[in-house]
Image (cartoon, grey):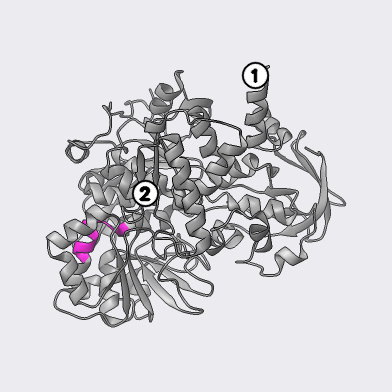
Amino acid sequence: METPIIGRVWKFGNDIDTDVIIPGKYLRTKDMQVFAAHAMEGIDPEFAEKVKPGDIIVAGSNFGCGSSREQAPLALKHAGIACVVAKSFARIFFRNAINVGLPLMEADVECQEGDEIRVDLLKGEVIVPGKGTFRGNKLPDFLLQILADGGLVAHRKKIQDEQKE
Amino acid sequence: MGTISEKIFSRAAGTEARANDFVLADIDYAMAHDGTSILTVNAFKEMEMKKVWDPSRIIIPFDHIAPANSETSATLQKEIREWVKEQGIPNFYEMGEGICHQVLPENGFALPGKLVVGADSHSCTYGAFGAFATGVGATDMAEIFATGKLWFKVPESFRFIVEGRLEEKVYAKDLTLYLIGKTGIDGATYKAVEFYGPAISELSVSGRMTLCNMAIEMGAKTGIVPPDKQTFDFLNNRAAAPYEPVYADQDAAYSKELTYSAGDIEPQVACPHQVDNVKPVGEVEGIHVDQVFIGTCTNGRLEDLGVAAAILKGKKVAVRTIVIPASRTTLLAAIENGTMETLLKAGVTLATPGCGPCLGAHQGVLGEGEVCISTANRNFKGRMGKGGFIYLASPATAAASALSGEITDPRTV
């Protein structure tokens, strides 16, 4: 897990739901590129084309509300999003993001779309050039560990391997 | 000195659990449907796990895209069926058996005091039976399949008390939408909501399922109705295992306590594109609808179909109307008691028990700009089809609207 994560900002508002992050009709596949190609389609049909690897989403409260579909954080991750910062997250999205290895942080950050910001997961803070440092909620260590391992699947595999030795 | 959630987690984690503690808890039952088991099985295989922790505690219903509507979904479903067989999972429910959140209660897996986790956000439905039930994503479910355990942050609890009784032609769905409107789409995020009061006790098991089903729509981790005689009667000869009802202690600590009066509630409608955009039906009466949808895990039960049939009896629907019973059992009962004949004679279209068009992936999706009044639980932008508008209401309001082709107060028909 790279930290701090430095990237360009895409801004979204409150209550961004899983139906706009990845509409239900695209769920009938295991192909990550399909999810990526339709990321955020419900709110910005061109998002998947505009987004660059390493970009960061900064959003308002209740990001990822709605369905349990893990395709939502997968779509963002495979579209190139390096991290999601939001004032708050819906709980299933929060778990899913960590499980698929998409870093996130709860923080109320003042910034503009296109700003290059620095998200430090280990310190639990976000630095916006010219605006200052914003304190966020640092993830508990066991969740940082899952992220560091690359998600829950890799984390579980690591534990299995350690048990074998 | 615990809430229902704290007491269930204390038992499941084998340690005294208080709100905001992180615990590793033993899961009693785990569910994944055709929509989420694809990624769950994938993750399980990637974890290089050989066997699931306990096949008898895993339940796999096919409901989201069932029957399969494309070669892709058919092939993915084939893979899941093969995996289910290979793992010896006995509780597999084929397409047509019904929606997961109906199938689990009908088969006695939603039990008081149990910790039930589903790879579906509406798994909170089982709180209607006094379980702690919540939704997770596919990889969390794979972790449960592998180990039988999952980490949780024990939620703080809200205590909602609903005094009085619902007026005539005002239903559990209206109460539910009203509470979501008051609480807001994220007003209960991370919280467990316990429901109390005479209006809650008076709700049928079916009505309690409607209420708990939509707890997630106020952000809640779960909604719980304390079990009572109605619960036990429903579970009689049905419970998949012995169970121990769990109740909150007198001195349990709640982060919020709110009292509502059922008598104040009129028929409610949640307007596009957010579930907490709730208005009394009077404010949206007359809005043209292109489609009516009666069904889903929120309102596709026998009681719901009965309410719709009573309104449609001897009449004809004015707009296309889709009815999808929540399960095969529901459909059979609706055939036996004449409800289905009434509905079909009124001109409704019947589809296979399952999720139908609710999430925009199966029969009955909307065209660009079309409006649907639906008994489902979500009206997010594009959910039932790009460019569609979804109004959420009770089966009574939906049926009354089917007769006129516009949103109609069921108290006027």
| Residue sitting at x 42%, y 58% | B181
Decide: is B211 above or below B356: above
Labels 1 and 2 positioned on one and the same chain: no
Q: Position of residue B289 (x, y in %)?
A: 38, 79
Which quarter shows the N terminus of chain B? top left
Decide: is B348 above or below B180: below
* Chain hosting mark 1: A
Q: Is residue B170 visible?
A: yes
Decide: is B343 above or below B230: below
Q: Position of residue A121 (x, y in %)?
A: 75, 37
Depth check: A135 or B392 in front?
B392
Q: Quadrant of residue A91?
A: top right
Residue B300, magenta (yes or no): yes
Which quarter shows the C terminus of chain B? bottom left
Q: Which residue is mark 1?
A: A164
> Three-letter amino acid code at disc 1?
Lys
* Chain hosting mark 2: B
Local SS, label 2: helix
Q: Callout 2: 10 Å neighbours few (<14), some, many (20+)?
A: many
Q: Position of residue B298 (x, y in %)?
A: 34, 56
Residue B100: mark: 2
Q: Quadrant of residue B312?
A: bottom left
Q: Is residue B310 visible?
A: no
Depth check: B81 or B24 in front?
B81
Q: Which residues are magenta?
A: B299-307
Residue extending furthest left? B337
Depth check: A143 or B74 in front?
B74
Q: CA distance from mark 1 to mark 2?
A: 37 Å
Question: Left of B329 or right of it: where is A35?
Answer: right
Instruction: Choose mark 1 or mark 2, whichever is in front.
Output: 1
> Three-letter amino acid code at disc 2?
Cys
